[in-house]
Image: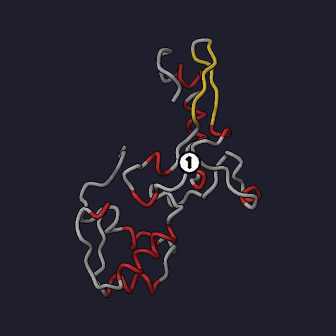
Amino acid sequence: MVGNGATNWDYDVSPSFPETVYNFNIISRKSIEYFRENNCTYFFNDFRNHTGSAGCDAVWDHINIVTGDMNWYDLYRKNYDSLGQSPANLAQGPIVGKENPLRMGSTVVDGKEMTYKKGYTMSEYTPWVKHFNSAPEKEVVLGDALTDYLNMEEVRTALHIPAYLPPF
């Protein structure tokens, strides 16, 4: 299992992202061709200066705007989850952020009811990625179903999670 496959900042994450999102049909052929023709390369959290022509900045900014609400780690995931974010409910505005009351769940641990926060926002999951650090009320919650599952009493028991450990 790979927790984070980034092993070489010269190739991983930002340098490979334009090609990745192009192959997912998220950015246009015009954008990727500009990147290729102008040798545009950006590096994770600007650990090194980017390469390419002056026009690369505008295309890189466009790529980041288009993909800003996406989960880099799961580009297949829809931008809604079980916190009431069905496509119909999204028309009324998504259920988002750290202070959302729907993010609180409860479970029984050793006969006592305990609460936990469901899921995570991208800025909670990857606080070092600058463009995900947006206002909590705008962030979509991911992983809430997994959090609920792992906090079920029978799952905690099956995984031999001791009762002295709080829900997660």
Image quarter of residue 21:
bottom left
The residue at the point 35 percent across, 85 percent down is 55
The residue at the point 48 percent across, 24 percent down is 159
Relative to the observer, which residue lies in front, 148 or 129? 129
Q: At which x and y percent is residue 97?
A: 59, 47
Find disc 1 in the rendering and name its residue.
142
Image side of residue 152 versus residue 128, left or right: right
Q: Is residue 162 above or below residue 91?
A: above
Q: Is residue 95 above or below residue 130?
A: above
What scheme was used to colour the molecule?
Answer: secondary structure
Q: Amino acid at mark 1?
A: Leu
Which residue lies most toward the front here?
135
**Where is the N terminus found, in terms of image quarters?**
top left
Mark 1: few, some, or many residues within 10 Å (few <14, many ≥20)? many
Q: At which x and y percent is residue 51?
A: 25, 77
The residue at the point 27 percent across, 73 percent down is 50
Image side of residue 14 versus residue 118, left or right: left
Image quarter of residue 59:
bottom left
The residue at the point 47 percent across, 15 percent down is 164
Q: At which x and y percent is residue 12?
A: 30, 62
Q: Is residue 27 above or below residue 88?
A: below
Relative to the observer, which residue lies in front, 74 or 88? 88
SS class, disc 1: loop
Q: Exactly how many numbered labels are in the figure?
A: 1
